[in-house]
Image (cartoon, helix red, strand yellow):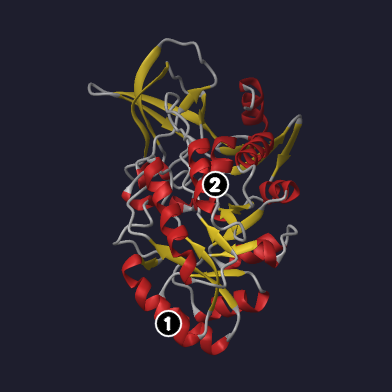
Amino acid sequence: MIDRKLLLQIAQIYGTPSYVYDLEDVRQRYLDLKDQLKGLNATIHYAVKANPHPKILHTLHELGAGVDCVSFQEVAHTLKFGFLPSEILYTPSCPSEEELTKAMELGVHVHIGALEYLPWIAKNYPGRPVGLRLNPGVYGGATPKTATAHKNSKFGIPAEQIDRLLEMVKKLSLQITGLHVHIGSDVESLNDLTAGVDFLTGLVPYFPDLQYLDFGSGFKVPYKPEEPAMDLTAYMDHVAQRMKNFPHLQVKFEPGKYLVARSGILLMRVNVVKRTPYKNFAGVNTGFNHMLRPMYYGAYHHIVNLSAPNAKPEKYDVVGNLCEEDTFARNRELPRLEPGHILALQNAGAYGFVMASHYNLRPLPQEIIVDGTRIYES
């Protein structure tokens, strides 16, 4: 991880708030995951929505990754960095026919998540291979907002519609070359993830044109220092066991947060320490307009006092500068804070800057890349 003194130097030179990404960490996460896939006929497709920064995409392309896109704008973005249509998975949510047309014409791997699109595909692109996103009815994810495979989720064709799906595939002469499932984000239960694997592998005999199974991702990222990492070895062992009967099929994974979350830090400055009879507030120079996850998901992000790491600890609510209820942490114990101190909000490499806005007409933070000894300003 990036050295504390270097982060303080970056804050001094480039100012705050700033996102800082460690490319070496991105490379290591990718290589570690690739090592877990040994023995599998598998490919890694980075989920671009997590962080579409050009240098991150360029780095992952150099390492041999493909990409997973959820909008045609993401598809167009990744083409700029050398990704071929054959390396792009396109899994949109409720796309327009115009967006689907662009993707089909380009030749990326399209995943359809609703029966209602299938007649349109058959009519406009007869004989063209497509994939299907399915919903196994498994509740898994860190929060209700990140659980994407339960029966009330908008994502995927429900398991209850499989019989109807098979009838439509036959009637419309559709060529289904891929099956996809994504349980959710930050899935804590290994059983939830393996349930998705079992669901897809159980359907293989019904789709004679299959070329791959896409198990999505959802690999848990430890956000708290004491949290354990997910047992990827056990998960991949399960995948390998289930795939033994289908040596002709490729396996695809779509990690996003898992590859980039740890690489990112949001640097912020303490504007004021407000002490009341009830609690201490550390007011910083950023807000949920720059990092939405704590407010939207209730997500925990570890915060470090870079300026005085050894000071006597006190409890604070770390709050933003928006005219809203805007809180990064409640009753968080931190080394005693003073105005001007630089804080580092960790695990900010995924769903941080990409979800930022100009709310309250405040400017966006900068993005800084650290690659070994080199520093780049976006």
Q: Could you tell me if residue 351 is visible in this image?
A: no
Q: Which mark is residue 240?
A: 2
In the picture as drawn, the residue positioned furthest to the bottom comes out as 123
Q: Earlier in the sequence, mark 1 or mark 2?
A: 1
Residue situated in front as seen by the camera: 159 or 362: 159
Left or right for 367, reference 356? right
Q: Measuring 47% from the left and 43% from the top, which residue is drawn there?
A: 291
Q: Which residue is mark 1?
A: 168
Secondary structure found at label 1: helix
Q: Callout 1 environment at 10 Å: few (<14), some (14 to 19), or many (20+)?
A: some
Q: In which quarter of the view is residue 320 placed?
A: top left
Q: Quadrant of the N terminus?
A: top right
Q: Position of residue 136 (x, y in %)?
A: 37, 60
- Distance of label 1 from label 2 (alpha carbons): 31 Å
Q: Measured along the vertical axis of the image, is residue 227 above or below residue 150?
A: above
Q: Position of residue 107 (x, y in %)?
A: 66, 73
Q: Callout 2 environment at 10 Å: few (<14), some (14 to 19), or many (20+)?
A: some
Q: Position of residue 108 (x, y in %)?
A: 64, 69
**Identity of the amino acid at label 1?**
Met
Q: Measuring 41% from the left and 73% from the top, which residue is drawn there?
A: 114
